[in-house]
Image (cartoon, helix red, strand yellow):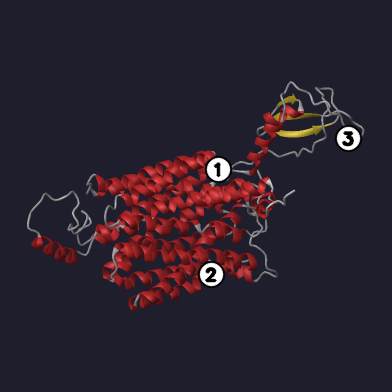
Amino acid sequence: MAAVPPGIRLLVSFDRDQWYRALTFLLTFLLYTSFHLSRKPISIIKSELHKNCSSVSEASTMTSSSSQQTSPPPLHTPTDCSWKPFDKKNYKQLLGAMDYSFLCAYAVGMYLSGIIGERVPIRLYLTVGMLTSGLFTCLFGLGYVYNIHNLSFYIFVQVANGLVQTTGWPSVVTCISNWFGKGRRGLVMGLWNSHTSVGNILGSLIAGYWVSSNWGLSFIVPGIVIAVMGIVCFFFLIEHPNDLKIMYADNSSPNKNQVPTKSWNGVNGNTEVYIQYKDNNTQVNYYYKDSVANQKSYDTELLLPSDSVRVPVQPVVVVKREVEPSAISFMGALRIPGVIEFSLCLLFAKLVSYTFLFWLPLYITKAAHLDAKKAGDLSTLFDVGGIVGGILAGVISDKLGKRATTCAIMLLLAAPTLYGFSMISEFGLGPTVGMLLVCGCLVNGPYSLITTAVSADLGTHKSLKGNARALSTVTAIIDGTGSLGAALGPLLAGLLSAGGWDRVFYMLMAADFLALLTLLRLVTKELSSTKPRPIFAVELKEH
């Protein structure tokens, strides 16, 4: 008999729950990758919406003088200076207004999204959000196809897209936290949160491919991608491990009219048992094998003996549950220790991160004198550094058991690094590449840690007494507050860049220091502790 191949041995070494856990990890990773993939194109096409008019005019003159024949111009000629209404001198303010409209709607909607997410099925909520997000992303690209130059149209699309994209983050964080417990949460979340940077990289590459020839496709293709992933979500996302247990129990139960014939020796001298399900004041007796299919959210007890319906069955272990905990209120979530501090810290950290997300390609275009495609490709290095930073922050915080201290150290190092990047970026491509990687690591490290591991810790804080239904609301509060900074950063960048890019970098450094200040109380508390341990040493409990 031939030996079993090593690869097959590896596959069968994992049990069913491990395979489903891996599926959930990969699926939620891909789902939120598509969210960020659809957000990135706006930063790539900015340099196309407002071109360098002087160089374009020279190219136009040379082309017209060398042409012998005249022909009707196409819909969009390569000699158009800019895309109206972004052809004016205040183009930076207009581009900043588009960023602000999306991010402001995202921030406001996030507070509501977490509350809604606690009360509706996550799978359906996320599916609807992804389908509508794909629709509005495609609508922006159709502005190019149908030659739309009305600023109100683009603002409306950005606002609508910002609102529907709030369905994503609370849903995926709640789902991944349901499947992964406290152990090594920083590492797991750090690896998982790299979807942000992966989405930005893919979005940059996709948008950059069409930015110079047909920037409408830079939006339409990502819109189709996120819509398709929404359909995948509907068919495959498993919200909680308990959902699988019920499904397998349903499939293993025989017909309710059949009575198990295999006898057993009894428990404590009793040879008969029955399961009783209680729903408020109503009691209903079922055969055991049929009861699993009908249990839904009923509480169960093992009763011995009874005068009611009895049937000989195999002995089973039944756990009595308390009444299903209710979703936490907004104010109740705010009272969880650490929520306010980390929310304010994320406000300033996300301000820095999203300023880079929306303005870095344009800055590289102006500072390094590169075209839109090359600048978009180069900007992906910031996200590569972000992947490393997120994983590094997770590993360090797991090792030290000090989330706030880890964030503070990276924020302290990020501020001077930002100043160094503003200086070195003028000295050529090589130094710029190195500084982009370092900046991405230090800027996105705290951002990644707070939005994942810290949010999951706070959502399962001991003050909740095991009520895990607060996770979505806590995640939404933290990320919603951070999104206020994400909205403010690009807007300020658009206003300050008119007076020089140095002002933008000074603003980013100030934001980093403010983020550091918001964590001082938690850092002091962590450093004064006698032994290293996670901030909130409570396991995520199933519900």
**Residue designated by label 2:** 408
Residue 237 image label: 1
- Can residue 436 be seen? yes
Q: Which mark is residue 267?
A: 3
Can you say whether 351 is above or below 243 in the image?
below
Residue occupying image coordinates x 72% and y 23%: 256
Relative horizontal placement of residue 144, taking residue 404 as reference (left or right): left
Q: CA distance from mark 2 to mark 3?
A: 58 Å
Mark 2–mark 1 distance (CA, rounded to whole Å) = 35 Å
Do the CB atoms of the residues marked 2 and 3 lie less than 8 Å apart? no
Amino acid type shown at disc 2: Ala
Q: Quarter-wise, where is residue 297 in the image?
A: top right
Which is in the foreground here, disc 3 or disc 1? 1
Q: Position of residue 219 (x, y in %)?
A: 34, 50
- Give the answer, above or below, for where 375 lies relative to 219: below
Q: Residue furthest front?
A: 1
> Which element type, helix, strand or loop, lies under badge 3?
loop
- Residue type at mark 1 is Leu
